[in-house]
Amino acid sequence: MSLVSRGKKLVSRPHLGLIALVGVIVPRRLRADWREEWEAELRSREQLLSDWDRLDRSHKWELMRRSSSAFWDALWLQRQRREDELVQDLRFGFRMLVKNPAFALIAISTLALGIGANTAVFSFVNALLLRPLAGVAEPDRLVMVGRQYRDKNYLSDSSYPDYLDYRAGITATSGLAAASVTAFHLSTGSETERVQGELVSSNYFDVLGVTPAKGRLITASDERDEAADSLAVVSFRLWQRRFAGDPNVIGSRIKLNGHDFTLIGVAGEAFAGIRIGTPRDVWVPIVTLRRTDSETAMRLGQRRASWVEMFGRLAPGATVGQARAEFSAMAARLERDHPDTNRNAGAGVEPGLGRDIEVQKELRRFAYLPSAAVAIVLLIACANVAGLLLARAAARQKEIATRLALGAGRVRIIRQLLTESVTLAIAGGAGGLFVGSWMTGWLRSLLPDKYLFLSFDLNFGVDWRVFGFTLACATLTGLVFGLAPALQASRPDVVPTLKGTQVSGRRSAGTRLRGGLVVTQVALSMILLVAAGLCVKTLRNAATIDTGYEVDRVLTARIDLARQSYTEVGGRAFQQELVARLEAAPGVEAAGYAVTLPLNDGRWENSIRRDGDTTRIQTFQNIVSPRYFEAMNIPLQAGRYFSSQDDERAPKVAILNQKLAQVMWPNANPVGQRLSFKGQTIEVIGIVRDIKGRNLFESPGPMFYQPLSQSYQAHPVLHVRTRMPPAQLIATLRNEVRALDSDLPVYDVKSLDEHLTATLTPQRLLAHLITGFGVLALLLAGIGLYGLLAHTVTERTPEIGLRMALGAHKRDVVRMFVMRGMKLALAGVGLGLVAAGSLAQLMTSVLFGVSPLDPVTLTIVPVLLILAALIACYIPAQRAARADPKTALLAE
């Protein structure tokens, strides 16, 4: 059919003309088949209705309406058009990267460092704050429940009777369970070890939705008092480690705290208790206490005792708000029915389970600074790669001008360049996952096993959150660093560029943009390095704080005699014999006990008063053995230390620290004075130096010491001062304990120096993190400055040749390029110095002993940056000075 006849047919058949018009937007490779299919269908419908000329108006409109649906079909095919163009862009971008392997390697490596740093920090945030409780069903439906006092903003433990009332009366939760953390001495055969566990309600595993790996879990029938056996469930990891994964262990007998238990099951592999980072290994019904620990079992009926954690699962359709309202109403009812024990005790409900609310708040506050630091590193990496892309775009001006001359639109060029940028970023993101994994391992090595009450036994591995974050970070990064070069490169002067004429205006615009990026990199590096300097000085100042005792060469360990059912008489004998044996061991200077361990333990508080005075004074308390002060080397200021004569038969005595002595008797000698404590009259026999307790950064508080021989404690902390490294005494300690009781485990064996290191975890982590990221930022900024000058040398090769041909000396060429680079560096240093001085004020809460405007830091860091910039400028300047004038003039 001729073109003319076809045109007449299209005019006489408007529906076929519409198909021809709409077909323009169909992808080219699909266009012919698409038009043939639609024209055949419409001709068929035309035949069914008879010929077009004999159709009435209504049928003609019906045929036109039907043909208009081809438009929607064509729009649907646009997805394939976009997919085709995207594949084409990706293929072309990949070829361009392969053709420039050096450029691709540098850009991908730079991005991998920036993205990897962000991935490492996010992995920590994910493990500490985001990863849900493992091994449970629908963790987002679990809620924490506890007593909520009006003057406190956190949840407290509840009493067991309150729990029973809540469980029976609340409908907003499909189940409400209770648990209490405890420790067990687990014995199987001849070996005994200390494991962490929980006393749990009968519905504990049902509420959590935990499934057993072997055997069965605790059920409602196991809570009955008449149950014949004491039952236990162990964790999967304990089953593998202690029982070698033996399936026949189910139904066997084990000993917990000296009592026989039947092992009925193994919890699912992923489940390790309701506290993330603090794994539990043994679970027993809470009512088992009635058979194994009659003293503790009394709390099962006491409404005043707060010792169980409550948690629940929201009922289908229920919300946290509904649960709060219902629990609050029940709490008001309990306060009304039991005013003596439940006065001012409301009920709080918080979503999620596994993390302490106050700890989460502290972690979020701590995470701001590292997150800001890695964001700055990523910005520097983006600026660095953007500079590389600008240099590369200058080299591709003819290619881009040719594509524009052949009809490509500017949007098409920008999309192609952005596709290349995103491809680079995705490759950098893949490398960032590996760099991030390595950095995460490095950061994990800086952490202790536990910091105060926060355990770091966490999964820091890559999960879908970390992967998604890295992918999003890479994609956003590709768009950020690729947009400015794409906009700049997509608007060349086509005709002069194709002719090979230099376009100085365009070149200077690109050079100015690259210079601005270098200034930005130097300024951001300045901010990070100033922050690093302040954090390092804080750590150094904290490490030199006078604690009031000698931290070096002291070994600490814990021994819990109560778990082995020692009587008070037997416990006293064991403690005295162990100290005697250790002090007789080679290299030991002194050994003693204390109930609380400074720096990494909770503080024990009580109130005392002067004898005959009704004014109560709040003070910290510790119970120690006679040789404790010598073991810690805490100096005596007046009076005497405790001695072996200060036993249970002797008059009650106490030692005060300087702060408490000053508070109680500011104008008199405290030695020989008497005070009243818990209805007893106690004589003050000595004054010792103030010491730092749990917080190194607070002034020492008042401290009240009692002798262990007059106030027996079954689980004090052993302190041993040695003349050798403490680690060399561990074997001796374990042997001496084993000789006295082979079934008694020794646990938490550490040097006092390790406890000090753990106390400084936030300061040490910040110092290492910010310093590491600051050095990385300095390296990237130096590379950016070097790259700018290296490209400028290449770009200005003819000018260099002309200058040298006209008599310029090499030192003039070196000076010219060094001065250009140093102007940018000095501009960045000045801008960064102003910004760092302002932003450092935000770090006041994490600094100690150093001002945010520390003159030493604000002097050393700029000098360091200027020296690094000078090196980065000098290398390409030297290369320019070595250029041969004849070769340079012939370069173009």
Image: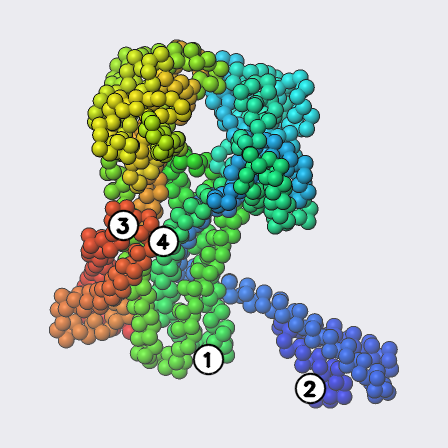
Marks 1, 3: nearer the viewer: 3
Whether the residues at callouts 3 and 2 have beta carbons within 8 Å, the answer is: no
Which label was assigned to residue 595?
Answer: none
Tell me the amino acid under the disc marked 1: Ala
Which label was assigned to residue 373?
Answer: 4
Which label was assigned to residue 405?
Answer: 1
| Residue 801 horizontal/vertical position (percent) | 20, 72
Mark 4, Cα crowd under 10 Å, few <14 / some 14-19 / many 20+, is many
Q: CA distance from mark 2 to mark 1?
A: 30 Å
In this rendering, would 664 be left or right of 292? left
Marks 2, 1: nearer the viewer: 1
Marks 4, 1: nearer the viewer: 4
For residue 22, above or below residue 100: below
Q: CA distance from mark 4 to mark 1?
A: 45 Å
User: Which residue matches tag 3?
Assistant: 534
Q: Which of these two is toward me, 530 or 601?
A: 601
User: Which residue matches tag 2?
Assistant: 3
Disc nearer the start of the sequence (3/2): 2
Is the N terminus in the top left, top right, bottom left or bottom right quadrant? bottom right
Mark 2, Cα crowd under 10 Å, few <14 / some 14-19 / many 20+, is few
Disc nearer the start of the sequence (2/1): 2
Q: CA distance from mark 3 to mark 2?
A: 81 Å
Q: CA distance from mark 4 to mark 2?
A: 68 Å
Disc nearer the start of the sequence (4/2): 2
| Residue 404 horizontal/vertical position (percent) | 46, 77
Task: Find numbered disc 4 in the image and state the secondary structure of the residue it sits on.
Answer: helix
Q: CA distance from mark 3 to mark 4?
A: 14 Å
Q: Residue furthest front?
A: 612
Residue drawn at 49 percent across, 13 percent down: 190
Mark 3, Cα crowd under 10 Å, few <14 / some 14-19 / many 20+, is many
Tell me the amino acid under the disc marked 2: Leu
| Residue 486 horizontal/vertical position (percent) | 43, 70
